[in-house]
Amino acid sequence: MKIILGPASTQLGQKIAEMLKAEAVNVAFKTFPDGENYVRLEGRVQDEEVAIVQTTSPPQDTRLVQLALMADAAKRNGAGKVAAVVPYLAYARQDTMFLHGEAISAQAVARMLSAAGVERLLTVNVHQEKVLAHFPFPAKSVSAVPLLAEYFIKRGLKKAFALSPDKGAIYIAEEAQKVLGGECGYLEKNRDRHTGQVTIRRKTFDIRGHPVIIFDDIISSGGTIVSAANILKELKPQRICVACVHPLLIGEAEQNILNAGVDEIIGTDSVPSSVSKVSLAPILSRALAS
Ligand code: R5P
């Protein structure tokens, strides 16, 4: 297998190639003056199985188009099976028609990638795993939550309370709890479908003097974590840490979270950022090899 280093995930792609002892294929890319994208594979892929590593965090539309162009280039240049390794899968949150007249963007994006040449997809903590069942190719999501929890074990936070800011994501806190060995719980979150405004209902946990780690799949605007931290602070934990798989951290999100009393934020290199302290390379290379 050869690993194609997508422009959005060059470092992660390199690490995966090293772990698999696979050849890495560089990609030349540029943007034309009118905003259109160009890519060119700089190595040969004839008769090779390839995995294109390309996250689709913002600017997601550009990165999706680059991914589609790389898949097309791989197929056109004689590659065998083309896998897309997309740690952060853009548009995956709209997996249902919530309001009349909406699109199901997750499916639309998958069909676009399939048409371009993608034949298999590997992602990480996709927002709703059930969305993958409707993709036109085999798709799998692996979890980075144990890696995030292990980071805190190394930092001496064994038995920290694992909290999910949302009942629907309690499985994330439960997964972390298995590694941390403490307790877990969730808050009740509600998001207005029209305004996007998040409200989190107060709950009581026995965390006075204990470290708490809030686990979430995505931090985007940071609104969810800020609301959760504001509630937790009143319960007087020893410290509040935050772990997410996909640190999109739009605008002032990181600073707003720290201002809300959070001591440390960590994320993975799904989205390269100032908090990306955990690499996905081990779990992605393992999944690709299996
Ligand atoms: C939503 O259900 C996700 O799990 C995250 O909680 C959400 O995407 C975070 O968004 P934000 O940081 O904008 O509140």
Image (spheres, helix red, strand yellow):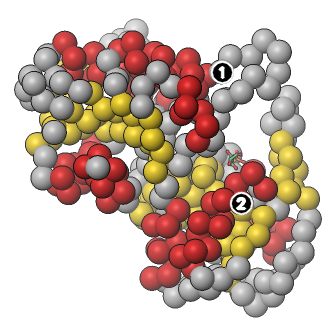
Left or right placement of residue 174 versus residue 227 in this view:
left
Left or right placement of residue 243 versus residue 64 in this view:
right
The spot of residue 164 in percent (x, y) is 72, 62
- Residues under numbered marks 1 and 2 in contact, where contact means CB atoms less than 8 Å apart: no
Residue type, numbered disc 1: Ile
- In this rendering, the answer to whether 90 lies above or below 209 is above
- In this rendering, the answer to whether 185 lies above or below 84 is below
Residue type, numbered disc 2: Ile
Q: Hey, which quadrant is residue 278 in on the image?
A: bottom left
- In this rendering, the answer to whether 254 lies above or below 213 is above
**Residue found 56% across the figure and 17% down from its top:** 108
Query: Looking at the image, which residue sits at the far top?
Result: 34
Q: Circle 2 sits on which residue?
A: 170
Query: Looking at the image, which residue sits at the far bottom?
Result: 209
Label 1 neighbourhood size at 10 Å, few (<14), some (14-19), many (20+)? some
The spot of residue 84 in percent (x, y) is 34, 33
Query: Along the line of sight, which residue is nearer the eye, 51 or 259?
Result: 51
Left or right placement of residue 176 versus residue 42 in this view:
right
The spot of residue 116 in percent (x, y) is 35, 15
Q: Hey, which quadrant is residue 138 in on the image?
A: top left
Left or right placement of residue 276 versus residue 74 in this view:
right
Q: Circle 1 sits on which residue?
A: 104
Quadrant housing the N terminus: top left
Mark 1 C-beta to ligand 1 under 8 Å? no
Q: Is mark 1 on a helix, strand or loop?
A: loop
